[in-house]
Amino acid sequence: MLGVCWYPEQWPETWWEDDARRMREIGIAWVRVAEFAWSRLEPRRGAFDFDWLDRALDLLHRHDLKVVMSTPTATPPKWLIDERPDILARDERGLPRRFGSRRHYDFSSPAWREETARICEVVSRRWGQHPAVQAWQLDNEYGCHDTVLSWSPAAAAAFQDWLRARYGAIEALNEAWGNAFWSMEYGGFGEIEPPQLTVTEASPAHRLDWRRFASDQVAVYNRMQAGIVRVHSPGRPITHNFMGLFTEFAHAPVAAELDFVSWDSYPLGFTDQRMPWLTAGERAAYARTGHPDVAAFHHDLYRGIAPGGRWWVMEQQPGPVNWAPSNPAPAAGMIRLWTLEALAHGAEVVSYFRWRQAPFGQEQFHAGLNRPDRALDQGGLEAAAVARSLPDLRLDCHPVRQAPVALLFDEQADWALRIQPQGTGCDYFALVFAFYTALRERGLDVDIRRPGQPLDAYRLIVAPTLPILDDATVAALAAAGAVTLLGPRTGSRTTSHRIPEELAPGPAQRLLPLKVIRVESLPAMVTDRLAWGNRVYELGVWRERVETELEPLARFADGEGAIFAQGGVHYLACWPDRALAADLVEHLLDRAGIAWRRLPPDLRLRRRGGLTFAFNYGSVPQRVDEPGMLLLGDPDVPARGVSVWSG
Ligand code: GAL
């Protein structure tokens, strides 16, 4: 169940045998190769050098290591860029993003699509049937380094075609976008440019369609690669490695073309760089562990779109990374904890990035399982410790079961909030994590579902916000009949980013009779007092005024309602702080009849089949009283440790 990313092209061949032997020794079964190897595979157009990779794959096979072979498209080589410069993506000013790092391509470039098809065919023909090759990774981290949007002539032309297909007639587009506003009307699709370099903000509908278009380009590109590899390497499952806290494209359509999904887990970097809503105290507390929910959230997020429930962690942080504002070393035990946590959430394989720290190139400060001097580093030692404990857990006998709670997530919700935030603090992930953390701190397993997926058999469904809410999702919520929470701004925009005729929450008015008649955002220093039962909260960020016959569950000091419910469906008419989100979650769990308990700080639980895992992100041992037989660890779960019970 363990793997590693290995770069034979970066090391003397005399080291390979020892590398493979030591991989086996510490319990590695899978090796991902070649995702950045294009310049070594094809040093000049058509002049292929396959021998070195043949030898590497043969050697891995001899050592009984299974290979995830990759298409090398994240790094088109220099000769190719010089030959076909229109492969390069353009930044918002229209300037080419230059050669010299990676991901410099434009998803829409016809030249690039041709070259992609060519190299995918070459590598999958050559190694598709190699006995070591047991899986494929397409490309590497679509969208990393801000590369989903390209402001190129090719993208502009493809955008026009995309709009033509979506709207049919220019009048329909003008109407949908509301182009009578500011004289933005177009006479034909050929006139429309990307929403780029406008004097002030471009139309929100224009920007939303631009994002949808760019997202579709990623899906089309991925489908093209998958189709080629499938032909030449039948029977080998295909994946792509997604990223964390990343919504630049819709992931479900990409996942739909894969055989399993994977994602790259860097808990320390994410906590430092991508969770700006955390307090200084939390940042300090989690600097060496990562936030206790950041990895778990993504395991659940990507498990939710995993074909047949199959997913991996393709890159697991092995030590300090190089790319966050600061890059502390993980506390002792964390690499083992992260690995077991991924497995507890159902990962098939956890693969570490990377086998050895590179003493050259951009990632010299990035740890590997081994140091540059070839000695095992902390990550390698902890990976070996995981491998030793796996036989006792017999994870294969414990498939993941459906959780009692579903949290609804949608990239489009983040797009809508970023296109028109209307107030600082309206951060989609902050809202999502407020609820996810509240649920996890109460010992719950959570499934993350998307609009459009079935919601049957959940007892509680939490939608932190779904600004663009379609009828199908409303119907699925109604059919599920679960206790439901709809957060602020739900149903506040149509698919064309207009305020719905019936006002927010739009089609959700069919679930409970209320109407949002005014909204306001609040500057950081302004709060309102919300009273609920005997508790009082000071809330800022966002408030809505609701018109309804319903008696509110909670009110603001001025008498306006803040939380409403009918049957099991609840509406929250303000931006919650973490305390309100937590109390609301307890209320909803009680309504849904779901048992919960407040866990000790920094402790998390996760069930996999008949196993219960406890993870202690804190710095002191925490007592957990679980029935069943202890398989691993201690009832006093050690700091940064893991305990597992069965039964
Ligand atoms: C990932 C990427 C890897 C490596 C790693 C460093 O985003 O896929 O190639 O750069 O980050 O943490």
Image: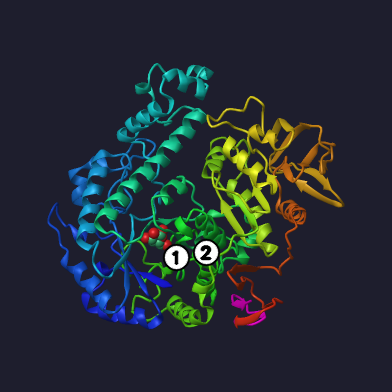
Q: Amino acid at mark 1?
A: Val
Residue 349 percent across, percent down from the top left: 44, 68
Q: Nearer the viewer, residue 298 or 206?
A: 298
* SS state under label 1: loop
Q: Nearer the viewer, residue 574 or 330?
A: 574
Q: Quadrant of ligand 1?
A: bottom left
Residue 269 percent across, percent down from the top left: 50, 61
Q: Does 457 lie within the magenta span?
A: no
Which quadrant would the C terminus be assigned to in this image? bottom right
Label 2 beta carbon within 8 A of ligand 1: no
The residue shown at (57%, 35%) is 420
For marks 1 and 2, give the CA distance: 8 Å
Q: Are marks 1 and 2 in contact (CB under 8 Å)?
A: yes
Residues packed near mark 1 inside 10 Å, few (<14), some (14 to 19) or many (20 plus): many
Q: Which mark is residue 268?
A: 2
Residue 384 percent across, percent down from the top left: 44, 80
Label 1 beta carbon within 8 A of ligand 1: yes
Query: Badge 1 is on which residue?
Result: 321
Specify the farthest residue to the right.
534
Q: Amino acid at mark 2?
A: Leu
User: Up-down: is 135 above or below 222?
Assistant: below
Q: Is residue 77 visible?
A: no
Quarter-wise, where is residue 34 in the image?
bottom left
Which quadrant would the N terminus be assigned to in this image? bottom left
Asked whether, in this view, residue 96 is left or right of residue 562, the answer is left
The residue shown at (72%, 35%) is 544
Q: Which residues are magenta?
A: 632-647
Residues packed near mark 2 inside 10 Å, few (<14), some (14 to 19) or many (20 plus): many
